[in-house]
Amino acid sequence: MRQERGALPTLFQPADVAKALGKSEWWVKEQARRGRIPFTKPGRAYRFTAEQVTEIVRLYEERPAIAAVPKPRAAGVREPEKQDRSRRSGRPTARLRSRIPRRAAHQQQEAA
């Protein structure tokens, strides 16, 4: 979208940007306030140009860390079995157990 020479760019409000990004208006304002996204601030209000909105989308774009195409395996080669974390690190892991809710503990104390 090219602007005519000398023409002012269209400025979008945070609500417009939020709707386009699928976020809340508060989120857009907070990111601008913290300097995480580009913005224009004529006076006291945050405004965004089309180029800034495009840049915001690029900032939060995520790309795959590895190639999406799986590597072919050689015939007859088995993948190693997955081990739990305690076997890999050599340290035993602690079992987590939930505690008794306060009401139940209180009722047990009153019954005793």
Image: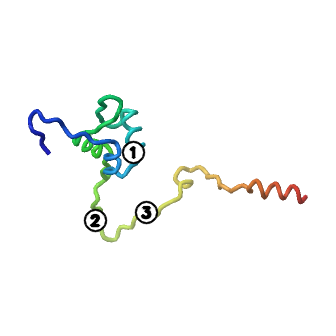
Q: Position of residue 78 (x, y in %)?
A: 39, 67
Residue mark closest to the camera, 2 vs 3: 2
Mark 1 neighbour density, 10 Å: few (under 14) some (14–19) many (20 or more): some
Q: The residue tagged with tag 3: helix, strand or loop? A: loop
According to the picture, the residue beneath numbered tag 3 turns out to be 80
Please identify, in this view, whether the residue under mark 2 or under mark 1 is nearer the observer. 1
* Residue bearing mark 2: 72
Tell me which residue sits at (30%, 70%) in the image.
75
Q: Along the line of sight, which residue is nearer the eye, 65 or 59?
A: 59
In the rendered image, the residue lying farthest to the left is 5
Q: Earlier in the sequence, mark 3 or mark 1?
A: 1
Using the image, determine if residue 75 lies above or below residue 8.
Answer: below
**Which residue is disc 1 drawn over?**
25
69 above or below 29?
A: below
Q: Earlier in the sequence, mark 2 or mark 1?
A: 1
Find numbered disc 2 in the image and state the secondary structure of the residue it sits on. Answer: loop
The residue type indicated by label 1 comes to: Glu
Sort mark 2 into few (<14), some (14-19) or many (20+) by Cα contacts within 10 Å.
few
Q: Is residue 80 left or right of residue 65?
A: right
The three-letter amino acid code for the residue at tag 2 is Pro
Q: Residue at x 12, y 42 (%)?
A: 2
Q: Residue at x 35, y 67 (%)?
A: 77
Q: Tag 1's secondary structure?
A: helix
Q: CA distance from mark 2 to mark 1?
A: 46 Å
